[in-house]
Amino acid sequence: MKKGSDLMMEVKDNKVGQKKKEKSTTTNHEKSSTQRKASSASKIKKLKSEVEILANELNELKDKYLRVIAEFDNYKKRKEREISDIIGRAGEEFFLELLPVIDDFERSLNSESKRRTYKSLKQGIELIYQKLISVLKKQGVEVIEAIGTQFDPELHVAIMQVEDKEKPSNVVINEALKGYRLKDRVLRYSHVVVNK
């Protein structure tokens, strides 16, 4: 059996060992707490850096976006002006081509009536008419041929029906008002008389 003094020594040693252990645990705990704080501070610093980088990228993208929007808006305005100019010039060219026709009409109206005969007047009007049709053809305007063709609701408006046994059914026999088309689009439908 152990003596009292040995026991005391053992208890003392245990207490000292336990205190050392507690001190070591406290020190380790303090060290790990310090390490965690340092690690957290490092993570926060890293995240702040990433946030700053992302904020700069966002500002750059916003700037690029605003520039693209402004460039597109300028492009759109420029194209609208160009189209308006093209339309204006096209109209201008058309009217310039019509002016000689008007000149011919004026010359015809201003010529002395004593020298004019019905035949010469008719010839003059026919020449002016041909010139006008030529100007319209240059612009893509054409007469819709109707008489003798099958009735087509895409091109004709039937104003009347008649019965002529010598002509085929559903054929245009007369035209009350000429129709015109501009390229592939109908400007005015032909007003026609159709055989039953």
Image (cartoon, helix red, strand yellow):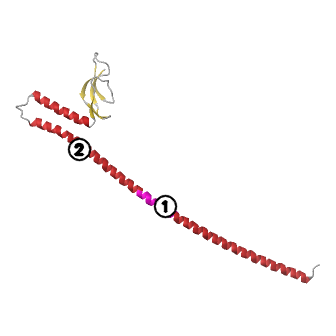
> Which residue has dot 1 on it?
58
| Horizontal side of residue 33 vs 97, given as left or right | right
Residue drawn at (40%, 55%), measured in percent from left and top? 69
- Numbered disc 2: secondary structure: helix
Work out which quarter of the rendered image holds the N terminus and state it.
Answer: bottom right
Disc 2 and disc 1: Cα gap in Å? 50 Å
Does the magenta segment cover residue 46? no
Residue drawn at (16%, 30%), measured in percent from left and top? 126
CB within 8 Å, label 2 to label 1: no
Give the farthest residue toward the bottom: 5
> How many badges with numbers are in the image?
2
Residue drawn at (49%, 64%), measured in percent from left and top? 56
Q: Where is residue 73 in the image (x, y as percent from the top left)?
A: 37, 54
Work out which quarter of the rendered image holds the C terminus and state it.
Answer: top left
Residue 8's image quarter? bottom right
> Which residue has dot 2 on it?
92
User: Which of pointers 2 and 1 lies earlier in the amino acid sequence?
Assistant: 1
Q: Where is residue 25 in the image (x, y as percent from the top left)?
A: 75, 74
The magenta region covers 54-67
| Horizontal side of residue 107 vs 139, given as left or right | left
